[in-house]
Structures are given as structure tokens and as C-alpha cells.
Image (cartoon, grey):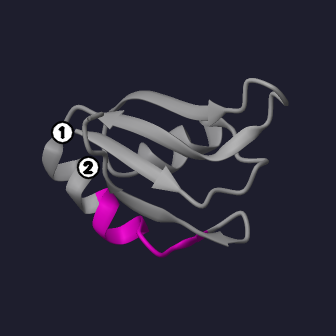
Amino acid sequence: MNIYVGNLNYRVKEADLQQVMEEYGEVTSVKVIMDRETGRSKGFAFIEMSDDAAATKAITELNGAEYFGRTMVVKEARPRA
């Protein structure tokens, strides 16, 4: 399952997110979206997990949780239109 994580602190790194998500199950990939011009994080990321049940549990427990001083938005990523 592909998961969208938004409202992230700009200091959050891919390794930080991977560590949090691995508490719920196997993480296939983590991609923090970066601004091409500034090289800074845009404040959101996409995480892929192989087990849908683990991903659903992570979404349920982490949506609205505070991380690096910000309230995260965690939900299933929608495919690009």
C-alpha cells in the first residue's frame, strides 16, 4: 500500500520516517518530496508498505499524531490523475 504523510517538519529525513513506519511492518520505500529550487523538503512524503493490514494500522494510529512538533496527516495515497 502507498501511504501519504503530510504536514511534516522540514527537518524530517527519510530514515526518520522509515524508523517510525517499521514499527508497524515492512517498509518497501520512503520518499520525502523535495523542492527542486531550494533543495528543502516540501513537508510531505510517500511511504510504501508491502502488508496492507500493517499499513492500515499505521494510518489509523499515526494520523493526527505529533511528530517533530507537527501534527501529521497520514492516509492512503491516491493514484495520480
In this rendering, the answer to whether 36 lies above or below 75 is: above
Query: Which residue appears farthest toward the right when viewing the image?
Result: 38
The residue located at (81%, 28%) in the rendering is 39
Foreground pick, 67 / 4? 4
User: Disc 2 marks which amino acid?
Assistant: Ala
Span colored in magenta: 58-66
Q: Toward which corner of the image does residue 9 lie, by quadrant?
A: bottom right
Q: Toward which corner of the image does residue 69 lie, by quadrant?
A: bottom right
Q: Are marks 2 and 1 in contact (CB under 8 Å)?
A: yes
The residue located at (30%, 34%) in the rendering is 80
Residue 73: x, y in percent? Answer: 47, 65
Q: Badge 1 is on which residue? A: 51
Indicate yes or no whether the magenta region holds residue 64. Answer: yes
Residue 24: x, y in percent? Answer: 33, 51
Residue 35: x, y in percent? Answer: 72, 32
Looking at the rendered structure, the secondary structure element under dot 1 is loop
Q: Badge 2 is on which residue? A: 55
Q: Is residue 40 left or right of residue 79?
A: right
Query: Which residue appears farthest toward the left when viewing the image?
Result: 53
Looking at the rendered structure, the secondary structure element under dot 2 is helix
Query: Which residue appears farthest toward the front when viewing the image?
Result: 81
Indicate yes or no whether the magenta region holds residue 79. Answer: no
For label 1, count other residues whose C-alpha is less than 10 Å away and answer few (under 14), some (14-19) or many (20+): some
Foreground pick, 23 / 30? 30
